[in-house]
Amino acid sequence: MKPIRLGMVGGGSGAFIGAIHRIAARMDGNFALVAGALSSDPQRARSSAEDLGIRGYDDFADMAKAEAARDDGIQAVAIVTPNHMHADPAVAFLDAGIHVICDKPLAATQEQAARIADAVRRSGARFFLTHNYCALPMLREARAIVAEGGVGDLRLVQVEYLQGWLSDPAQGKQAEWRTDPGRAGAGALGDIGTHAWQLAQFVTGQTPSHLSAEVSSIVPGRPIDDDARCALRYASGAKGGLWVSQVAVGQENGLSLRLFGTAAALEWRLSAPERLILTPKDGPARILTRAQDRSQSYRTPPGHPEGYLEGFANLYSDIAAIIRGDTQLADRVPGLADGLSGMAFIAAAQASSSADGAWVEVAT
């Protein structure tokens, strides 16, 4: 099959997440990057496009119109801008009939999220959200185990995402915009909290109905949250906990998920992404590896490690299949519903924390 023609908004020279998306998109040969509006700075946008050898645009709105009018125009676009710049390009490309692949979280504000949702509903194009961790093989296997009753009735959920890179006042481009409420919307809640929320939801198949939260700005003078602790209640009766922090000194990227049911427990950690520990109630723990992964979401033989980049690439591969008409993979690729759920989580956590940890219903 010919590669799907891909565009990109944001991700110009020196941008971290843009480079990640470009690598992931080309890893399996399903996409070819052909156009981009790579920066809000016209000169940087042009030079970045020249460096990549693609059609360059100074403005995403002009790009959406021009590409939609071309016979060889882009079929999908990746939006890899700061959070506050997700909505405008997403709406422009959806209205032009071009599929949108958007980095998480969905937006910086509820109003922006609603605009994207409206555009998705009136467009014939698809919308995808790149929560990359749920595409890792052993988390897809964990989801299958839970769905087939392998842990019994779910009782306890504990998800954590701990980093320490913002333990001091922000320095550098990434830290600058991620600690700016105007560009990020939320701090740790949006940046890594939505990852933790979506991951627990993906694996368990359940969304908390209520939460009680303490959201903090621990670094003095920081105008945005950098630590959040949430107690979770599920309609099924299960209880949960979610802790995210970007001021946990010594933690690099400490994402973990533990589930406890009536029959067994499951444990997964990003530090060992290809190992899933299944502990039956009345038996010894079993270590499952990619050799037992039924989704076969990998490129190298088990024992040849894959990780962060491959999770993104798994999503891009599945997205390509969906765009080409596959109807079997949609339930494992995050989309609008996941984005709206993440925004509802942020809003509920902020509301609860403002009310001294009162239990708040999570909007659905």
Image (spheres, rainbow, N blue to C red):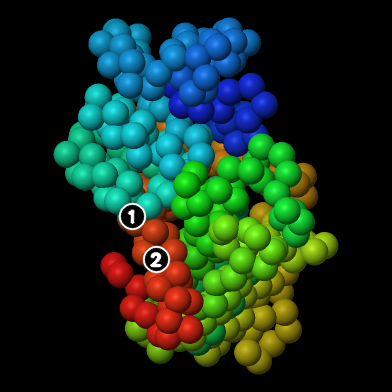
Q: Which residue is mark 1?
A: 110
Determine crowd level at label 1: few under 14, some 14-19, many 20+ residues with C-alpha closer than 10 A.
some
Residue in the image at 48% along x and 11% along y:
56
Closer to us: 90 or 140? 90
Q: Which residue sits furthest left?
A: 122
Q: Amino acid at mark 1?
A: Gln
Whether the residues at callouts 2 and 1 have beta carbons within 8 Å, the answer is yes
Residue under circle 2?
A: 347
Q: In this rendering, does residue 183 appear at all?
A: yes
Q: Position of residue 69 (x, y in %)?
A: 26, 11
Q: Residue at x 40, y 85 (%)?
A: 359
Q: Is residue 63 left or right of residue 244?
A: left
Q: Vertically, is 249 above or below 116?
A: below
The residue that appears at 48% across and 83% down in the rendered structure is 357
Q: Earlier in the sequence, mark 2 or mark 1?
A: 1
Mark 2 element type: helix
Residue 210: which quarter of the image? bottom left
Looking at the picture, how far across and down is residue 223, in whole percent? 57, 58
Residue type beneath disc 2: Ala
Q: Quadrant of the C terminus?
A: bottom left
Q: Is 19 or 321 nearer to us in this picture?
A: 19
Task: Label 1: state its secondary structure.
Answer: helix
Percent of width and height locating residue 92: 29, 29
